[in-house]
Amino acid sequence: KKESELFEEIEQAKKIPGVKRIFLADGDAMVLSFRRLKSILEKIRQALPQVERVSAYCLPSNLKKKSIEELAELKALGLGMVYVGCESGDDVVLEKIQKGETYQTSKDALIKLKAAGIKSSVMILNGLGGRKFSEQHAVNTAKLMNETQPEFVSTLVVSFPLGEERFAKNFTKNGLAPYRKLTQQGLFAEMETLLSELELEKTIFRSDHASNYLVLKGVLGSDKASLLAQVRAALH
């Protein structure tokens, strides 16, 4: 959208009473340049001074050209949290789904956000690697979380909006066995591995999206034992 059009929408939001939080919609707003993001946040602050937090989606690679100092300036202007679609910490799985990210790009982005004071809410896809890559998907995703210590982690179950066949094509290249999605039991087993491997200090964990078969909520690591107990009860 043109900046003038966007600013007009921000002005219209002044008519809505009690606005405390704003989400920069509808895709990944962090793809915008630092200049544009700064301009938008300054307009929000000028028009809606009562707003306490602005948030947005964020692909790790979209932070590559933004410095910690620039991100800290966006934080000072109200950008309090971003939802980072890591999906996996395993490079093989990321390559298979053509994510355009790697373990390292995700790690660099999360560390940069923490250094700037912006909270991260990381999204992980349970079952993303199918049966063949399930364990390494869980183990390496946990490793990524352990090394970056995000403030929030949430898991969703992988879905196939463009069809499972299209999704599975890259998994069968070079003579590999066909992609086989996880059963409900398989998803629980993968979650058990993920939770077992996570060594987080104070991260809010949520697995309560509509796609999840089992609702899990807690703080890691203080609730690790109880969360694992819930998963193991579901498995049995």
Image (tube, rainbow, N blue to C red):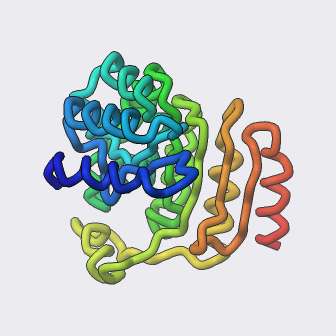
Spot occupied by residue 27 in the image (x, y as percentages of width and height):
31, 57
Tell which residue pokes out farthest to the front in this image: 15
Spot occupied by residue 207 in the image (x, y as percentages of width and height):
65, 60
Instruction: Quarter of the image for the C terminus: give it.
Output: bottom right
Which residue is painted at 22% across and 65% down in the image?
174
**14, 111: nearer the viewer:** 14
Where residue 202 sits, quadrant-wise, is top right
**11, 152: nearer the viewer:** 11
**40, 81: nearer the viewer:** 40
Which residue is painted at 23% across and 30% down in the image?
34
Instruction: Quarter of the image for the N terminus: give it.
Output: bottom left
Tell which residue pokes out farthest to the top in this image: 69
Spot occupied by residue 149 in the image (x, y as percentages of width and height):
58, 31
Which residue is painted at 67% across and 67% down in the image?
188
Quick check: 185 left or right of 162? Answer: right
Seen in the picture, residue 47 relative to 117 is either above or below; the reply is below
Residue 166 visible, this orientation:
yes
Seen in the picture, residue 74 relative to 15 is either above or below; the reply is above
Seen in the picture, residue 118 relative to 188 is either above or below; the reply is above
Q: For the image shown, how many numbered marks are present on the structure? A: 0
Quick check: 3 left or right of 186? Answer: left
Spot occupied by residue 3 in the image (x, y as percentages of width and height):
17, 46
Residue 89 visible, this orientation:
no
